[in-house]
Amino acid sequence: MALDEKDCIILNLLQMNCRMSLTDIAKKVSLSIDSVNKRLVKMQTANVFWPKIQIRPRNLGFNTIVDVKIKLNYTSKEDVEEFTSYLRAHPRVAEIFSVSGEWDFSIVIIAKDPIDMGRITSEIRFRFGKMISSWTETLTTNSFKFEYYDMTRLMGFSSTKVKPNF
């Protein structure tokens, strides 16, 4: 789907405040409410975005957020499927990425504290220890930008009407 500058501005606005009303968006992009709604429906149908909320784990008592890089031994497709299925079902694994380069997977684990993190990582490493060749952890101390895409700049438009406030 090709996006025009107004689509990009709409997406930027929604990234900053996903609860912004159609009326407010329409005013900011100089379109009718119906036009904004049609654009949103079209973009959502084309899977340009997925409406969601962002939960802040630290505000819920999960103060330890760790990025884990994992390298696997040569394993079967079934072993990798079992590994990823286990991680997807684990309530403390927030993100799972298959990556290229030195590592095979990047996962994010949330925990209440370092002791809780140790329990979770030991559980995963014990269960899949024969598959895991290397494992490294990095504690996330702060987030300065998370999943924000300046759509107008990304798509090559010059508009600076909407700037993030983070």
Image (cartoon, grey):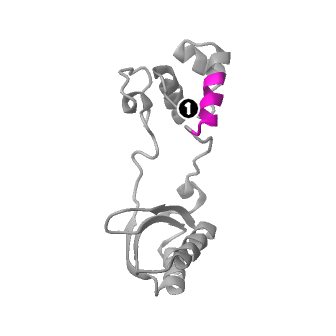
Residue placed under numbered mark 1 in the picture = 14
On screen, 102 above or below 144? below
Q: Quadrant of residue 86?
A: bottom right
Indicate whether 56 appears above or below 126.
above
Residue 121 among those drawn in magenta: no
| Outermost left residue | 102
Q: On the rendered image, what quadrant is the C terminus found in?
A: top left
Question: Considering only vertical position in the picture, is 87 above or below 150?
Answer: below
Question: What residue is shown at x 45% (from left), y 63% (from top)?
Answer: 98
Position in image of residue 35 (x %, y %): 63, 17
Horizontal placement of 141 versus 17: left or right?
left
> Which span of residues is magenta-colored?
38-47
The amino acid type found where label 1 is placed reads Leu
Picture coordinates of residue 84, whole percent (x, y): 55, 70
Residue at far front of view: 77
Residue 85, percent from left and from top:
60, 71
- Decide if residue 102 is on the left or right side of residue 116: left
Q: Secondary structure at mark 1?
A: helix
